[in-house]
Every structure is written in C-alpha cells, then in structure tokens.
Amino acid sequence: MELTPELERFVGLFVRWNARINLSAARTSEEVTLQVVDCLALLPYVEGPRVVDVGSGGGLPGLVLAIKVPDLRVVSIEPVHKKAAFQSSAVRELGLRNVQVLSRRVDPTIDTGFDTAVSRATFDLTEWLELGRCLVRNGGLILGMEGREQRDLPLGAERIPYEAGDRTRAVIRYRP
C-alpha cells in the first residue's frame, strides 16, 4: 500500500527517533510502514469527533488517524515519557493541530466522554474492551486490534478480519 506524503514523513520521523529511543520493535521504514498500514484498517470504523488512543507508544494508531482525518480531535495517552516526547515532536513537525499528547497513564475517572476509544498492542483485548467502556460516552465505540490469536469476545463485539500484507488480522468493534 502506498502512503500519503504526510504518512511517509511520519514514518521517516518514527524511524529516526526509533534509532535513538525504543518506540517499537519495527526498525526499518518497511517495518514501520506495515504498522502504519495496520493502523489504517481502523479508519472505516472510527467515529468522531473525539477519539482517545490509550497506550499509543509512538503514535500508533492515534497520530496515523489524526493525519488521515483532520476533523478528528485525537487525545493520545502514553505513560512512557520518551514515547510521548516523540509524539509531541511529531505533532509539531507535521503541523498537526488536532492532537493532544498526554504523558501519563489513562485515568477512567477523568478520561471520559469520547466518541471512540482505540488501543493497539497495549492491553489484553478483554481488559481493553472493559477499560474502554469507561472512556466512551453513552453509545460510544471501542476499537481494538487482534493479531493471529483470536479471543472470545463479549456479547455485542464484532470481529472484522482484514489482510495486512501476508497476515490476517482483525479490528474488534464494540459498542457497550
């Protein structure tokens, strides 16, 4: 899949920073591009305008979503300071006006009322879907990402498979 120039700039920044600090196990442009493409699988399902990305690491998927959908207002919550610092730098360098980066743990007592909550490779899927319930408004949407190993899903959750290169993955869509 070919990336937009904005996403290519993001990949370049990610690779440069990742050489100095550990943002991800992905080291090459090709590996980071695969992770970005993986995040793009969420696009058809995100509802806005307020989106929270919990444990966003190097901005995957939060910054990717913000780049692709400028009308979203993305709050990226990342407790590891160096990863949040990367995101803040990327927001400045890419001129993203629709992202707020918070360098702290998610707090379900104050991080509430979002239209969509997303998380990728941060929590056990069942744990994430339960936490996500606290973060979204009534009728809001929780999105998770599933790798090869499929989990039992709560009633009402939907598994939407997609191809990512030579791998099959799934978006989990849950509206509690």
Image (cartoon, helix red, strand yellow):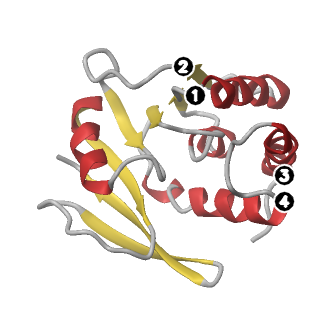
10 Å crowding of disc 2: few (<14), some (14-19), many (20+): some
Front tag of 2 and 3:
2
C-alpha separation, residue under disc 2 versus residue under disc 3: 24 Å
Residue ID for mark 1: 80
Residue ID for mark 2: 102
> Is residue 130 positioned above or below 165 on the image?
above
Question: Residue at the location (59% across, 44% down)?
Answer: 65
Q: Earlier in the sequence, mark 4 or mark 3?
A: 3
C-alpha separation, residue under disc 1 versus residue under disc 4: 23 Å
Question: Residue at the location (83% across, 48% down)?
Answer: 15
Q: In this image, 48 relative to 5: left or right?
A: left
Which secondary structure lies at badge 3?
helix
The quarter of the image holding the N terminus is bottom right
Provide residue 89's location: percent of width, then percent of height: 78, 24
Q: Which mark is residue 8?
A: 3
Q: Mark 2 belongs to which amino acid? A: Leu
> Is residue 102 positioned above or below 134 on the image?
above
Q: Nearer the viewer, residue 147 or 110?
A: 147
Residue ID for mark 4: 29
Which secondary structure lies at badge 1?
loop
Provide residue 29's location: percent of width, then percent of height: 84, 59
